[in-house]
Image: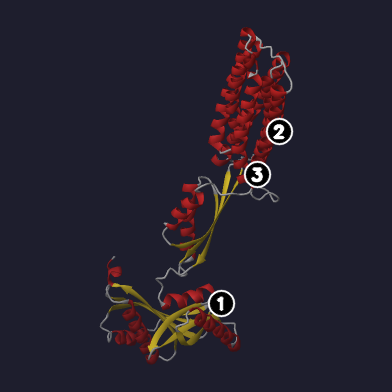
Amino acid sequence: MTVVATTAEQMEHLEMQREKRRVALNSVYAAAFITIGKILVGATTHSLGILSEAAHSGLDFLAAIITFLSVRVSDRPADADHQYGHGKVENFSAFLETGLLLLTCIWIVYEAVKRLAFKEVHVQPTIWAFIVMFASMAIDVWRSRRLRRIADKYQSQALEADALHFGTDVWSSAVVILGLALAWIGEKRAIPMLEKADPVAALVVAAVVVHVSWRLARQTIDALLDAAPAGARASILSRVSAVAGVVEVDRVRIRRAGNQYFADLEVGISPRATFQRSEEIAGDVRRAVHQALPGADVVVRSVPRSGGEENIFDRIRSVASRNNFNIHDVSVQDLQGAIHVELHLELDEQLTLVQAHEVVTELESKIREEVPEVSSILTHIESEPSTIETADAIIRNTQLEKELRAIVKGFPEVLDVHDFVFKRVRGHLYLSCHCTMSDDLPLSKVHYISTAIEIRFKQKEPKLFKVLIHTEPETDNRR
């Protein structure tokens, strides 16, 4: 039996799909009902206001179908051909709605001008005309609120467009009702000017539609052209710049696809930051971006940048690190105003001397290029083991250990020496031991003492091939 585990995120996505599709489908049914009703009463009353509203609702019906289909497509996950998902379908759907609304306006204005200036049409308001228009307003209020709630909940631009349309339909319907009422009064009281209220109401409807269309057009075009949301970039820059470890923010790019934002950032961090620290900083940057754009898909690229506080040692190590070189024991001397650098470079033990020398020449050239105050560089080449060594045996040598302990007693800084281990590796004698020193002893002094002890050990026993001295603080032995 196979059990399929559904994560909370998947459940949330499925619920989003159901809610968006349900409200979009309800909008299609409502638009169909309203359009049919307005066409019937508009044809019987000859009211341009109602007919313009019928045309408006007819296009809303078509737009609702487009919205429903776009919502079904936009929720599909990203694939090989649509790596940012299918969210742009919603933006394109909203753009189509804008075009349809503008076409409606052109027809309404044309017909209204013709009735006002060239053609007289007698409007016959009926009780059914008022019933249909009031019913239309009630339905538009209901579906506008539902669409707005779901659009805000899931940041759906297509549903937001529908909500905006149907919200303004309430006011345009009210204008038509007012036009019908004035036309009816004009007919009953024989006031010719009032009989022109219907085409005037139609022009008001057209003006409302143009206003709504312009607002929607700006939003959809911005989304299709990947315009960053107003103030989002400045907010991200401010938040990311405050993240600990970020030296500078080189690039911030934002795009939107449907209800999903994508942010691409390049941040400068210290050249000496480890891979682990670099990832920690990138995680903090993502969280900072999410404060400005919740739920955004964030990609962070970190690049080494000098923050101005690095000394010459940091800059030399930075050059080596960026070029994948492992250096240590960096020494810098001021020789009568000329800066001289000495360093140890570890290279693969399989390289030949000529190959290693070419690598050294390359590194020294890069250091001089990026740290121009350096006058001369001397590099000591060390072989970096690339194979696991097999220890033949651990040797007990009590006499040698006693002699080495006597040597350590000549260094008063060493409080204790213990854990002597002798090994034979590939025919060579290896030694390791632990030396305890004072907690507050400077590291430079600790290194000097351990190096001096190593030299004395090898002088005492020339067969020692490698000596490793592990230094530890006094408090560590008290635990």
Image side of residue 380 versus residue 205, left or right: left
Q: Residue 251, position in %: x, y?
A: 53, 59
Instruction: Tell me if I can see residue 383 in this picture.
Output: no
Q: Which mark is residue 88?
A: 3
For label 2, count other residues whose C-alpha is less than 10 Å away and answer few (under 14), some (14-19) or many (20+): some
Q: Residue 160, position in %: x, y?
A: 58, 34
Q: Of circles 1 and 3, which is in front?
A: 3
The furthest residue to the left: 412
Q: Which amino acid does label 1 sit on?
A: Ser
Q: Residue 240, position in %: x, y?
A: 46, 55
For the residue labelled by badge 2, is the local secondary structure a helix, a strand or a loop?
A: helix
* Mark 1 or mark 3, earlier in chain: 3
**Residue placed under numbered mark 1 in the picture:** 386
Check if mark 1's residue and mark 2's residue have beta carbons within 8 Å: no
Image side of residue 320 versus residue 108, left or right: left
Residue 89, picture quadrant? top right
For label 1, count other residues whose C-alpha is less than 10 Å away and answer few (under 14), some (14-19) or many (20+): few
Cα–Cα gap, marks 3 and 2? 23 Å
Tell me the residue at 44%/85% (across/down).
341
Instruction: Tell me if I can see residue 295 in this picture.
Output: yes
Q: Nearer the viewer, residue 416 or 421?
A: 416
Point out the image quarter for the N terminus. Answer: top right
Q: What residue type is labelled 3?
A: Lys
Image side of residue 424 versus residue 66, left or right: left
In the image, residue 299 sits, relative to residue 269, either above or below, namely above
* Mark 3 or mark 2, earlier in chain: 3
In the image, residue 16 sits, relative to residue 135, either above or below, namely below
**Residue placed under numbered mark 2 in the picture:** 103
For the residue labelled by badge 3, is the local secondary structure a helix, a strand or a loop?
A: helix
Cα–Cα gap, marks 1 and 2? 74 Å
Cα–Cα gap, marks 1 and 3? 51 Å
Residue 106, picture quadrant? top right
